[in-house]
Image (cartoon, helix red, strand yellow):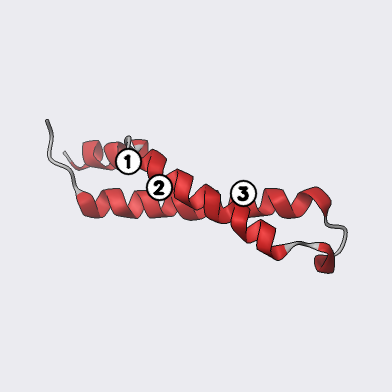
Amino acid sequence: MKPINWHAWAKAALIRAVRTFAEAALAYIGTGAVVLGDVNWLAALSAGGFGFVSAILLALTGLPEEELSTLQRR
C-alpha cells in the first residue's frame, strides 16, 4: 500500500468540494429565480452545503487529481 500525501489529498478534496458547492447552489438558483430577490438563499446554501459534504465523503474513496499529482512527481 502506498503512503498517502495528506496535504495534497486535503487540497484536492477541498477544491473539489468548493466547486461542487458552487455548482449545486447555482443549479438551485437557476431553476426558479427570475430576479435576484426571488432566490430562496437558505435553500440555495443548503443545496450547496449538501454538495460540499457529499464531495468530501466521496473524496474518502479516492481522488483522481491527487493520484495524478503523485504520479507526476516521480
Depth check: give the residue in front, 35 or 50.
50
**Where 47 sits versus 4, above or below?**
below
* Residue at figure coordinates x 70%, y 64% from the top left: 41
Q: Earlier in the sequence, mark 3 or mark 1?
A: 3
Q: Secondary structure at mark 1?
A: loop
Amino acid type of the residue that numbered disc 2 sits on in the rendered structure: Ile
In-image side of 32 versus 43 (left or right): right
* Residue at figure coordinates x 32%, y 36% from the top left: 62
Of the numbered discs in the image, which one, if any, rests on residue 60?
A: 1
**Where 36 sits versus 73, above or below?**
below
Residue of label 3: 24
Of the numbered discs in the image, which one, if any, rests on residue 56?
A: 2
Q: Are marks 2 and 3 in contact (CB under 8 Å)?
A: no
Q: Residues within 10 Å of mark 2 (few under 14, many from 20)?
A: some
Give the position of the N terminus as an image quadrant.
Answer: top left
**Where 59 sits versus 36, above or below?**
above
Q: Real-space Cα distance between discs 2 and 3?
A: 14 Å
Q: Residues within 10 Å of mark 3 (few under 14, many from 20)?
A: many
Q: Earlier in the sequence, mark 2 or mark 3?
A: 3
Q: Are marks 3 and 1 in contact (CB under 8 Å)?
A: no
Amino acid type of the residue that numbered disc 1 sits on in the rendered structure: Leu
In-image side of 74 versus 14 (left or right): left
Q: Are marks 2 and 1 in contact (CB under 8 Å)?
A: yes
Please provide percent x and percent y for residue 30.
Answer: 77, 51
Please provide percent x and percent y for residue 35.
Answer: 86, 64
Q: Secondary structure at mark 3?
A: helix
Q: Real-space Cα distance between discs 3 and 1?
A: 20 Å
